[in-house]
Image (cartoon, rainbow, N blue to C red):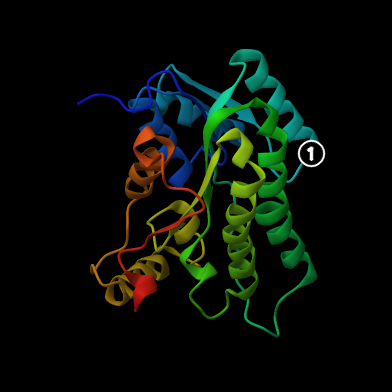
């Protein structure tokens, strides 16, 4: 089967685990040269070993302007351009109304909203005309779930970014789309539970609620990301693609 991203340069934020790692691996398998970012250098090194020799890791936090500047400089120096930006880095913290803290609120918006905005803006000069930007939102941005109101608000903002940015970038033919994953079996999702047993129970509950009867796997997000990044999605712009087993529809 022909590779769909041969010759492309991609950046995946939050690429050391979960959805980001799965997507970086898929991009590389489809022929792209891949840069990944993450906060933990050891995890980044492990990810590069899994992705392959065409991967480059850049340690950094998307909520830190200095780190974003370094990411831009490394990509610019080593590749000179970007064709695909998969803006995935984010954090999950939960609290019901009445228990929300200012510290958690600030962390969520700093990473999930500010980090998203300034990642795209910092890399914008490197994006080639006709590039593809894929933003990662979440099912909870449009579906109410207990204890998730602030996290959900950060993910709903991402949906709005795509609508505005596709118009801001119209003159450069840069497409901006959103993937909204549902329950995907990642370290981040499991980490929301207090222990392994609770995590397994949570996944089991999700499976009962999801029409396809199971939680998703990271590579199922990655396959959609590859499509949106490819020429096959050339007429898809400003869209939100739910990858959630049908959960948002019920």
- Residue at the farthest left position: 1
Q: Is residue 135 above or below residue 51?
A: below
- Residue 147 at what x, y percent from top left? 57, 78
- Residue 82 at what x, y percent from top left? 57, 26
- Residue at the farthest bottom position: 98
Quadrant housing residue 98 = bottom right
Which residue appears at 29% of the width and 70% of the height?
207
Is residue 163 or residue 87 the one in the foreground? 163
**Disc 1 designates what residue?**
65
Tell how many labels: 1
Q: Secondary structure at mark 1?
A: helix
Which residue appears at 60% of the width and 41% of the height?
170
Is residue 201 or residue 34 the one in the foreground? 34
- Residue 99 at what x, y percent from top left? 70, 81
- Residue 200 at what x, y percent from top left? 35, 66
Q: Quadrant of the C terminus?
A: bottom left
For the residue carrying disc 1, how many other residues have a C-alpha within 10 Å: few (<14), some (14-19), or many (20+)? some
Q: Is residue 212 left or right of residue 152?
A: left
Quadrant housing residue 219 = top left
Q: Is residue 149 left or right of residue 98?
A: left
Which residue appears at 74% of the width and 34% of the height?
67
């Amino acid at each position: 089967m022909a590779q769909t991203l041969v010759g492309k340069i991609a950046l995946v934020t939050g690429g050391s685990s979960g959805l980001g790692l799965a997507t970086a691996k898929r991009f590389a398998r489809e022929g792209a040269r891949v840069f990944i970012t993450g906060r933990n250098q050891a995890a980044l090194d492990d990810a590069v070993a899994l992705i392959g020799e065409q991967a480059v890791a850049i340690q950094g936090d998307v909520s830190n302007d200095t780190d974003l500047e370094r990411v831009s400089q490394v990509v610019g120096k080593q590749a000179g351009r970007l064709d695909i930006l998969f803006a995935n880095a984010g954090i999950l913290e939960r609290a019901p109304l009445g228990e929300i803290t200012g510290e958690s609120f600030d962390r969520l918006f700093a990473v999930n909203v500010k980090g998203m905005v300034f990642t795209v803006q910092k890399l914008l000069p490197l994006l080639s005309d006709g590039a593809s930007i894929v933003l990662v939102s979440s099912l909870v941005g449009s579906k109410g779930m207990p204890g998730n109101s602030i996290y959900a608000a950060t993910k709903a903002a991402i949906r709005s970014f795509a609508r505005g940015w596709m118009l801001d970038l119209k003159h450069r033919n840069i497409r901006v789309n959103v993937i909204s994953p549902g329950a995907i079996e990642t370290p981040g999702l499991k980490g929301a539970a207090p222990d392994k047993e609770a995590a397994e129970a949570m996944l089991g509950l999700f499976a009962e609620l999801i029409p396809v009867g199971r939680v998703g796997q990271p590579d199922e997000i990655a396959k959609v990301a590859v499509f949106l990044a490819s020429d096959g999605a050339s007429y898809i712009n400003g869209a939100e693609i739910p990858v959630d087993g049908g959960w948002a529809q019920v």
